Amino acid sequence: MSDSRADLISSRPIRPGWELALVLGGTLVALVLVLQPAFLAVAAAGLLLAVAAFQFDFFMYAMVVIMPWYPLLDEHLPVTDIMLILRFVMFAGIWLRFVRSRRSIPEWLWGTKLKKAVLLFAVITIASLLFSNLRTNLESYRAFRRLFGYLLVFYAMLGWLNGKDRLRNVVQASLFSLIVVALFGFAQFLSGEYTDFYMRLYPFQEGAMEPWAGRITSFLYHYNSLAGYLNLVLPFGLGAMIAARDNGLKATGFLALSLGAAALSLTGSRGGMLAAIGVLVLAAWKLVPRRVNFFWILAAVVVAVGVVLLLHQGATSAQGDTAIERLQGVDDFTQLSRFALWGAAVLMFRSNMLIGAGYGNFRYLYNDYIPAIPGGQLDAHNLYLQLLAETGLIGFLAFFLMLNGFFRRGYVLARVNDPVYQMVGIGVCGAIIAFLIHGLADFLFIVSPQFGAMFWTVLALGLYAYDDYLGKH
């Protein structure tokens, strides 16, 4: 094993010299953000690569914290998706750790039935593309490239997690990230725009952004994507608030749940709000016998409502009215377009019921069924119909049978006495329930790499915690 490999996978404490280097690197990134925002992503990626080479654990925590940020570079450059490269570094670093410690790589990648189910779903998505009439459509392969990036995160997290302390730390890092996401969303709401800071974070994506509509996006690209992301992390705030015995983690969970719920309401996503309410109702129903838990849930809701009211007082009347009107009903255009897209998905599914039209191909085929809506822009706005349309019955069943396996493991964890495993179990079950409810109105995997990475991170947390719990009991 070469010294460079040993350095890459080192988990020893950072030396004082590297502490200084990290401070200087962080300062450099801040200066780049102010002076040359177009090079921010490159500077940040370079800093993260340096951290990965000498302190891989710190790099992994950093990737969890910055997951809501996903910059793309100039499309004329050879590489535009710099975060995909960092996710490959995550996976490669864990691979090298397994090689160095002589641990079984096959066991890591496909050693259990659920891991095989994950790989089976990936194979089915590839097959749906190869057997599609649009097999030469490069855009559909870009959709699979994003799925490939999600799987890199999934397996990297599975291989890196090591004991309850790291499991707890990852949850805490995710909750901290959620709080920052919510606070930046509040700043957008008060300013009534994406903000200059947002434009500096995404200098090459400004032309593709929709005009500001009064619905916050925080660090994500779209308000519905933000709602989906929040609903994946909010249940872990609930789990920390209910199950954690550490007062610091309990307080972090309460703060994340309160601020995240307030931010969710400002997205104006009806599907996202319905999903969050569904999770809270189910949690309260299951936890009512323990009145203290019901009290904390109610307290978090009260704080969230209070934060929203304060923000509306500080925002312009037009900004506040836009957010409220959005939640009061569905306009005719949205209703008719959704019905049209759903009908197109059904017809697409009927044309190839077994393997579908190919993963990522819906947006390039729906114009054949709905000439009035330009193609290449929209998804089906329904998780179930889009999976049926793109991957057929085979892919649909493979995905939901796989998801059922993760939910069952999370449910087992949610009922154990150990606070860390119980926290993760509540988080996993809540995130999957929210995902399934929100999926009635949205399909976010292709349009939101932040959502997709967090979804597969949630699954990795649940699978590792379940296997670790069984191994110790």
Image (spheres, grey):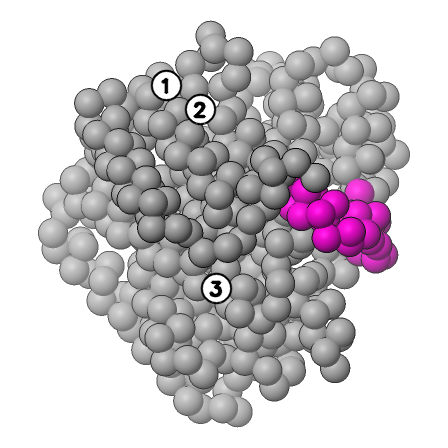
Q: Earlier in the sequence, mark 3 or mark 2?
A: 2
Q: Residue at x 68, y 28 (%)?
A: 144
Q: Residues within 10 Å of mark 1 (few under 14, many from 20)?
A: some
Q: Residue at x 50, y 60 (%)?
A: 170
Q: Which residue is mark 3?
A: 169
Q: Position of residue 208 (x, y in %)?
A: 40, 20
Q: Secondary structure at mark 3?
A: helix
Q: Position of residue 197 (x, y in %)?
A: 23, 33
The amino acid on which the numbered mark 3 sits, given as a three-letter code, is Asn
The secondary structure that dominates the magenta segment is: helix
Q: CA distance from mark 1 to mark 2?
A: 7 Å
Q: Which residue is mark 1?
A: 204
- The reply to whether the C-beta atoms of the residues labelled 1 and 2 are less than 8 Å apart is yes
Q: Secondary structure at mark 1?
A: loop
Q: CA distance from mark 3 to mark 1?
A: 33 Å
Q: Residues within 10 Å of mark 2 (few under 14, many from 20)?
A: many
- Residue 139 lies, with reference to residue 234, above or below; the image says above
Q: Secondary structure at mark 2?
A: loop
> Left or right of 442: which side holds 304?
left
Span highlighted in magenta in the image: 92-119
The label on residue 72 is: 2
The label on residue 367 is: none
Nearest to the observer: residue 210 or residue 410: 410
